[in-house]
Image (cartoon, rainbow, N blue to C red):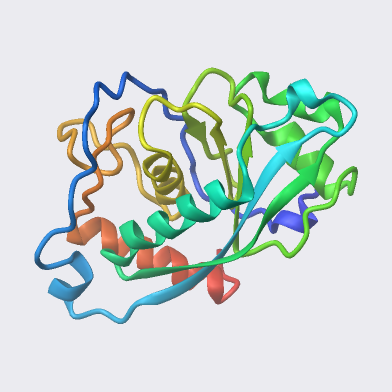
């Protein structure tokens, strides 16, 4: 299968389901970040963000604006800076996707969507090392990152903070798995936790280095 525009790589990414926000506030940054504690060099990682719309069937289009997604991207950079991964937001804008391709996102899979991108059935301009798609629907979950791809999807109305969903899915792309015991952690599914351990930061930076070196 070809995913030429998205540079498909073999990294496990898991779908994450959501729970109610209940007015929770995002966790603030720690006094000493994991990367500062480890004395490691930050790694730059370019990311492009796309708002999925359908000109022929507007009911399938995401309701997000470019300004909204730019703001989400800015907050994502703050979260990942704590781990020494410097998210560099490149292209942010709408892409027109055929209705039948958008409808494949009724289940949290994404492979058919990415296949259509690889087959050039719609344009994905200026793809970064990781690409994010903001969609009206993500198959009933807050967001997901398809198996083996450097891509993630986020629904229009997640039950937790937008930047938290995006950052969580980026974590999966960078080789991190779900945390099961601490809801304050970024990789705990369906909460507003933002924290990364020093071990997770090390794994994420190593994965980011591999992506930028073309080894992942």
Q: Is residue 78 above or below residue 62?
A: below
Displayed quadrant of residue 98 = top right
Residue 73 x %, y %: 48, 55
Residue 87 in sight in this render: yes
Seen in the image, is 182 located left or right of residue 72? left
Quarter in which the C terminus is drawn: bottom right
Give the residue drawn at x 19%, y 33%.
183
In the foreground, 96 or 140? 96
Seen in the image, is 44 located left or right of residue 31? right
Seen in the image, is 3 located left or right of residue 87? right
Displayed quadrant of residue 89 = bottom right
Quarter in which the N terminus is drawn: top right
Give the residue drawn at x 49%, y 23%.
141
Residue 128 x %, y %: 63, 64
In the foreground, 4 or 94? 94
Residue 1 in sight in this render: no
Residue 116 x %, y %: 83, 40
Residue 91 x %, y %: 66, 62
Give the residue drawn at x 24%, y 26%.
23
Q: Residue furthest left?
A: 31
Give the residue drawn at x 19%, y 61%.
198
Q: Is residue 125 above or below residue 190?
A: below
Displayed quadrant of residue 99 = top right
């Amino acid at each position: 299968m070809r995913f030429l525009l998205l540079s498909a790589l073999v990294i496990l990414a898991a779908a994450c389901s959501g729970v109610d926000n209940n007015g929770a506030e995002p966790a603030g940054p720690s006094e000493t970040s994991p990367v500062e504690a480890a004395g490691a060099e930050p790694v730059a990682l370019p990311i492009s963000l796309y708002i999925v719309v359908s000109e022929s069937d507007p009911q399938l289009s995401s309701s997000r604006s470019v300004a909204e997604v730019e703001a989400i991207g800015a907050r994502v950079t703050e979260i990942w800076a704590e781990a020494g991964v410097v998210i560099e937001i490149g292209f942010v804008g709408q892409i027109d996707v055929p209705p039948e391709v958008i409808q494949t996102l009724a289940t949290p899979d994404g492979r058919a969507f990415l296949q259509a991108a690889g087959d050039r059935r719609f344009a994905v301009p200026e793809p970064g090392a990781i690409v994010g798609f903001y969609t009206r629907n993500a198959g009933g979950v807050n967001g997901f990152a398809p198996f083996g791809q450097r891509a993630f999807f986020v629904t229009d109305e997640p039950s937790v903070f937008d930047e938290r969903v995006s950052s969580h899915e980026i974590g999966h792309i960078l080789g991190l798995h779900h945390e099961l015991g601490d809801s304050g952690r970024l990789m705990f599914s369906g909460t507003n936790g933002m924290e990364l351990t020093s071990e997770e930061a090390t794994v994420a930076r190593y994965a980011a280095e591999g992506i930028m070196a073309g080894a992942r």
